[in-house]
Amino acid sequence: MTTEPGTGNINADPQFVDISNPITSSGFHLKPNSPCIDAGRFVDGLSEDFDANQRPYDAVTWETRGDGSDFDIGAYEFIGEAQLTPTPTPTPTPIPTPNLPEVVISTPDGIQGEYVEIPFILFDEASEPTSIWVKYSLDSGETWNWAWSYKDPQLCTNNLTSSPQGTSHIFPWRAGLQAKCNMYDQVRILIGPYNSKGYGYSDYTNDFTVDNLFQLPRAKLYASSILKRAAYIPVYYSLYDCTNDLTDIYIKYSKDAGNTWNWITHAPGGDGTTNLETSEEGVIHHFVWNAAQDLGTASCPDCKLLMYTLNTKGVSGPWHSDFFSVDNPDGPWIRIYKPENGTGNTITVYYRLYDYQSVPTSIEVRYSSDNGMSSSGCVDAPGGDGREYLAASPEGVLHSYNWDVESDIGCGQFDQLIIYILPYNIHGSGVCQRTDSFSWETCK
């Protein structure tokens, strides 16, 4: 019986660390000059080797090996800086077989910007749906990183049509996030195909230029921070700009999963909408949305926000939040202020009560002495404004609450105290807010 070398095999010494003693933990690890480093094929879902090290790991930075995915051949991924093999064995260029998918990629024409369309053609003898992986390089292929899409990745990378004659596609690369705030003239894109037959033959572009030195401002909305039960909802976001230009914002809301959009009504507070600070790394701001005015008493299970950004370079967007729900848009809300570290048997907590119709509002107060791991109800101390039927307004009314800390936790030094306050009135409960952790010493 005779055997023939398979596609991708290497006829060379693999340079194992200790082949004479393979049972040891180091036996089949690779030496720095092993030709097996970065010479493997992409394996979907494989992220660790037998030692739980990251896989793949780009150790060969001077050339592209294997299919360009940086997986090592063998059970162990080489972690470190590879070395040139002293006496490399030439590897014949594999001849594509008709059974594996193949991609042919075109280099974009002209100078590109934040959104780059990469044309490519997918070939497969059986016209089997074929997926792709995509990397980019800013240094003529010396180093590679995974490329991001500005469209749904499921639609532009998974189960794409192919044919024996080739089917044309576009990969929408988000260069504004991965080649940002500068001009790059050694940009390359690498695309590799795979389907049920295995990983096919990749291709990459020639060098092309991306100029994002004066790219438009952008924003990121944080839906996870949005209160779920409040009339006035603070919304946090980051503003990015390569040249730190002051930037204006415009915001819309949707209460039907993005089918229709309306301009939001602003509530008091927040950072405003004009001349907002920016930076390349992003500056966090917030605005306050009058959800009671815009939503009324109806719940909004599929709310969404979008934002446009504007400065001297132009308008960009829309920048969308994720979906979030608002189930009591006319409920009260509260802003609580952390007490300064101190001593004594009573702690005074200041807070501001908001209600869009100025409805009297009551509060429930709890504390934690273990940094939020558990909580209990607070014992009231004399003084303060009490708990029931407190004044509230759209602009917020300042109140104080006195906590009898000695009765609740005794004498000693406590370094992980937290106060929680929940507002409620005829509109229902708002969202419980808490202080940051603070320190207090009792019985002094």
Image (cartoon, rainbow, N blue to C red):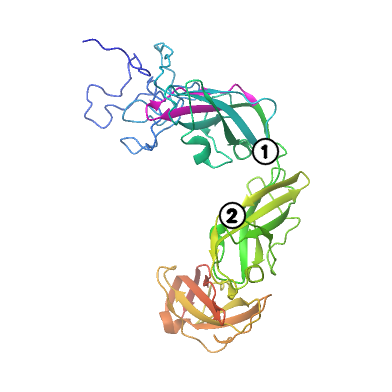
Q: Disc 2, disc 1: CB below 8 Å?
A: no
Going from N to C along the chain, the mark reached first, 2 or 1, is: 1
Vertical position of residue 23 compared to residue 254: above or below: above
Residue 232, image x, y percentages:
63, 70
Asked whether 334 falls inside the magenta stretch, the response is no
- Residue under circle 2? 321
**Along the line of sight, the residue nearer the viewer: 439 or 227:** 227
Residue 322, image x, y percentages:
55, 54
- Residue under circle 1? 181
Q: Which residues are magenta?
A: 189-208
Element assignment for label 2: loop
Circle 2 crowding by C-alpha within 10 Å: few under 14, some 14–19, many from 20: some
Tell me if residue 121 can be seen.
Answer: yes
The total number of labels drawn is 2
Residue that lies at the very extreme toward the right in this rendered image:
312
Residue 35, image x, y percentages:
38, 19
Q: Report the predominant secondary structure element of the magenta stretch.
A: strand
At x 35%, y 25%, the residue is 73
Circle 1 crowding by C-alpha within 10 Å: few under 14, some 14–19, many from 20: some
Residue type (three-letter) at the residue carrying disc 1 = Cys
Element assignment for label 1: loop
Residue 401, image x, y percentages:
56, 82
